């Protein structure tokens, strides 16, 4: 059965895309990948660990909560490494698998395919019905359906916006009305942007806004995986009901990548179903195109058509040349990815969740008390960057054994900070140099972390140094 094509308009007018619904093994895979992404997006903001968010990006406080740890502005190197890891992961996996992210895991694709298009089909009908109604005159029914559809789109946009902002403002606070006005303002902005995308922009986001489509030309090569039409078997196209012309010698080598054998030429019956199901509005038979997001809907459309003729699909995942996993591009990207990952893990292993600084208190460098002891005063700022309450103890190092310090143990809740005065005294008889090395060791009893701060102890001195 022939499938009606989208109307072709002049270049200055947008040709609206009406994707036909399709079922198949790749769409089942898409459903599972989409469910996994949505589970992470919707559930994680509600989870906590030891009373702290499991994951939250707190921009006003410049903190990142991640799996029991709290990263601050002093941990910027970790954010840089995470950004580099994401970038090199994109390079590496694109060089191997092309745009599988776009087709199966990109939030734009997931929400359009799992929410927006099903709503549209439920309210306005399948592809042909929607096309006919849009071409027809306005009526009460048409207005009612459009209003219902856009209302549903607005609801989905608002829901997704709330979920996205929950990663930054906290799900409990946001959904109970306890978040800041700025957070709800961001919900409004995201809702408007998402509604515009769902209702109008759609595939144009992939074509004109997302930079990934532009990057892929530099990230991939002839051995990267792409969705491709086997012109050697499919051309010349024939009318439905006619038989293919046998001729194994005309097959392209890429046909073997589809799992096919010599089936002859003219296998394509020009049903145009691959065109009708494409969410980007392209014809995969015209060759590789920048707009293709490798969603495999055209493969799922072609497989049952060709199966009726006892042949494998004319469209499949393949590469322009023989694919090799190990080649200069993948080795380079894989090496960079491994190096960044190793650096991140090494720094993470050596990172302490005790964050502290110690500076001299304003005033004189030292004071000689009435009993002849020399006193220095410092201010210790201590922050608990772990996801649980901590008990901290302190010990001095570097000074003579009879030095004393007034600094009792401290208990801190997660993400709590305190400023403590540290008073260090030394007998006058131990004073020889004007400057003595001093260290303060801070031990976290619950987490087992330890940190040592180095500073100096100032005295009148007796040896002139």
Image (cartoon, helix red, strand yellow):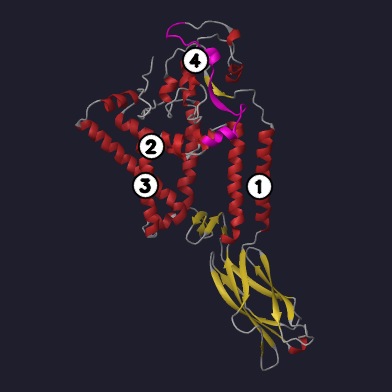
Q: Is residue 158 visible?
A: no
Q: Which quadrant of the figure contains the C terminus?
A: bottom right
Does the segment drawn in magenta span residue 196?
A: no
Q: Residues within 10 Å of mark 4 (few under 14, many from 20)?
A: few
* Magenta part of the chain: 214-242
Q: Residue at x 63, y 23 (%)?
A: 321
Q: Residue at x 61, y 42 (%)?
A: 88
Separation of marks 2 and 1 at Cα, in angstroms: 36 Å
Residue tagged 1 = 340
Say above or below: 405 vs 415: below
Q: Nearer the viewer, mark 4 or mark 2?
A: 2
Residues marked 3 and 1 touching at CB (< 8 Å): no
Residue tagged 4 = 307
Residue tagged 3 = 191
Between 382 and 436, the one nearer to me in the picture: 436
Q: Give x and y (percent) for residue 249.
A: 61, 8
Does the segment drawn in magenta span residue 215?
A: yes
Whichever of labels 3 and 1 marks the residue nearer the N terminus, that label is 3
Separation of marks 3 and 2 at Cα, in angstroms: 14 Å
Say above or below: 462 vs 301: below
Residues marked 2 and 1 touching at CB (< 8 Å): no
Q: Nearer the viewer, mark 3 or mark 2?
A: 2
Label 1 residue SS: helix
């Amino acid at each position: 059965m022939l499938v009606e094509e989208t109307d072709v308009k002049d270049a200055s007018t947008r040709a609206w895309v009406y994707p036909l619904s399709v079922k198949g093994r790749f769409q089942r895979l898409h459903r599972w990948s989409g469910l996994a992404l949505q589970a992470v997006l919707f559930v994680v903001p509600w989870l906590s660990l030891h009373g702290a968010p499991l994951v939250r990006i707190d921009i006003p406080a410049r903190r990142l909560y991640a799996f029991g740890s709290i990263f601050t502005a002093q941990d910027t190197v970790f954010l840089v490494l995470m950004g580099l890891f994401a970038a090199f992961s994109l390079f590496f996996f694109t060089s191997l698998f092309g745009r599988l992210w776009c087709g199966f895991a990109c939030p734009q694709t997931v929400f359009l395919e799992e929410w927006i298009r099903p709503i549209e089909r439920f309210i306005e009908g399948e592809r042909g019905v929607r096309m006919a109604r849009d071409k027809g005159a306005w009526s009460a029914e048409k207005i009612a359906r459009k209003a219902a559809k856009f209302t549903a789109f607005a609801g989905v946009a608002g829901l997704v916006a709330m979920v996205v902002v929950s990663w930054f403002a906290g799900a409990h606070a946001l959904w109970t009305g306890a978040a800041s006005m700025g957070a709800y303002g961001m919900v409004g902005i995201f809702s408007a942007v998402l509604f515009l995308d769902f209702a109008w922009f759609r595939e144009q986001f992939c074509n004109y806004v997302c930079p990934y489509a532009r990057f892929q030309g530099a990230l991939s090569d002839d051995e990267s995986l792409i969705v491709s039409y086997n012109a050697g078997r499919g051309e010349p196209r024939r009318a439905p009901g006619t038989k293919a012309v046998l001729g194994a010698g005309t097959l392209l080598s890429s046909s073997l990548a589809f799992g096919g054998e010599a089936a002859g030429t003219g296998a394509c019956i020009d049903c145009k179903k691959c065109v009708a199901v494409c969410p980007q509005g392209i014809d995969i038979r015209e060759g590789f195109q920048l707009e293709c997001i490798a969603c495999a809907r055209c493969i799922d459309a072609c497989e049952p058509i060709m199966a009726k003729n006892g042949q494998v699909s004319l469209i499949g995942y393949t590469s322009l040349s023989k694919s090799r996993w190990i080649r200069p591009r993948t080795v380079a990207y894989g090496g960079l990815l491994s190096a960044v990952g190793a650096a991140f893990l090494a720094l993470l292993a050596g990172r302490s969740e005790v964050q502290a600084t110690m500076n001299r208190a304003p005033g004189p460098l030292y004071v000689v008390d009435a009993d002849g002891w020399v006193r220095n005063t410092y201010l210790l700022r201590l922050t608990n960057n772990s996801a649980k309450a901590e008990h901290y103890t302190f010990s001095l190092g570097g000074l003579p054994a009879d030095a004393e310090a007034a600094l009792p143990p401290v208990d801190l809740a997660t993400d709590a900070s305190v400023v403590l005065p540290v008073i260090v005294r030394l007998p006058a008889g131990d004073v020889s140099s004007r400057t003595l090395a001093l260290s303060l060791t801070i031990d976290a009893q619950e987490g087992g972390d330890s940190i040592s701060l180095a500073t100096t102890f100032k005295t009148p001195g007796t040896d002139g140094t």
